[in-house]
Amino acid sequence: MTKSIFSLAIALLLLSSCQKDRSNSENANNGKVSSALSPSLPETPFNYAQQNLPNYLLAGPVANADNTPANNPITNAGASLGRVLFYDKQMSANATVSCASCHQIENGFSDPATLSFGFANGETGRHSMSLANSRYYANGHFFWDERANSLEDQVLMPIQDGVEMGMTLDSLIQRLETLDYYPELFSAAFGSTEINSDRISKALAQFVRSIISFNSKYDLGLQQVNNRNLDFPNFSAEENLGKNLFFSPAIGCAACHGTDAFIAPGPRNNGLDLSNDDDQGIGGQNGNPNQIGQFKVGSLKNIDLTSPYMHDGRFSSLEEVIEHYSTGVQNNPNLSGPLRLPNGGVRLLNLSETEKSALVAFLKTLSDPVLNAEEKFSDPFPES
């Protein structure tokens, strides 16, 4: 009995000591809670603002499509803060998911699941679109149905979504204010330690806009010859055939994905069968019948890593995507012009097996192994 009382006394003494240590730690940090999962960051921020982009991304159609607003240019400190916010699971109601949970670097900042899972394991309504080259979507609207008018608007919406992250902006700000690693990051990015939704939005948008693909096999080939109409010396014969088909008017892929960012300037209806699909895209969201079946067009960079494809993940492989354009395009009043014949019918490509294989081979040259392995875009939290 005496031994049991002695053991209980020791346990109570240890508990009291732990509570005192935690209280002292919070007082020493002005009420901030030290996290066991603080981010690991370099003393000097990574270079996000002045990346060594090739000339074809700095001028011409790609540069003209840049949706960066004048009041939110990319800065190294701002994108560094954005990276931490992007990967921080404290951004969700139960601290289980982050932005990166649905936009995984190893999958081209997309999700290998058809539908992503939110903080309470609920499924999202659509497949997670890749974030690469978001900076170069000319009309600046985001989500498949383009309901966000800017990237700054978009990055706050999943946080407040009842399925995805389940937070309010007020509760998010209150939580971030308790974490000891944020004051210095906000101060470096914006000049003071104040945390507000505008700053969170701007930092996240800066990080996402900095995710630019320019080190794929295609990019390296283009830099060698500086003319995409010539054969690339680093391509196989099949890859060059696929490239020539892709950019040829006869096939017409470049009509929607024609810039070297491989992204259209606005939404398109690409002839998907929506007869059993309640999701009518932009028209379903804004009520405009002329936009029924239109969806935002993502970049094709890293396309080999971002399966499944389309807003609902209906195609599991690039081969299935090519087959859709070869034989599967469905008529629709809002069908994109390049998929329409002069007489008003549907334009099916009816590709040969050789042509299909060549197009798939070319699309695989758009994968960027440097982007997907670069530390500045990776998770800064250890064991998160």
Image (cartoon, grey):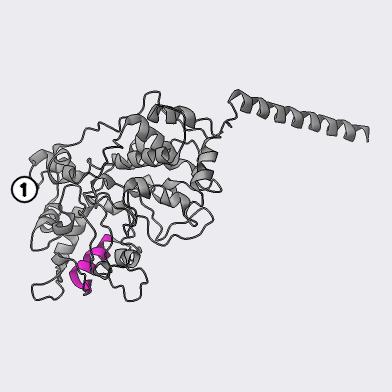
Of 285 and 13, which appears nearest the observer? 285
Q: Which residue is mark 1?
A: 230
Q: Who is closer to the viewer here, 287 or 382?
A: 287
Residue shown at the point (17%, 42%) measured from the top left: 63
x and y, in percent, of residue 11 in the image: 79, 32
The x, y position of residue 369, in whole percent, is 28, 42
Q: Say what amino acid the circle numbered 1 marks.
A: Leu
Q: Quadrant of residue 254?
A: bottom left
Q: Residue at x 17, y 58 (%)?
A: 256
Say if the magenta span includes residue 321: yes
* Residue 315 in view (yes/no): no
Q: Residue 66 versus residue 39: which sits nearer the camera?
A: 66
Residue 328 lies, in percent from the top left, at 23, 72
Compared across the picture, whether 230 is left or right of 131 comes to left
Residue 146 appears in the rendering: yes
Q: Residue at x 42, y 51 (%)?
A: 157
In terms of secondary structure, what is the magenta stretch mainly?
Answer: helix
* Quarter the N terminus occupies: top right
Q: Residue at x 31, y 57 (%)?
A: 146
Asked if 218 appears above or below 38 in the picture, the reply is below
Q: Position of residue 271 (x, y in %)?
A: 23, 69
Q: Quadrant of residue 329?
A: bottom left
Residue range (magenta): 318-330
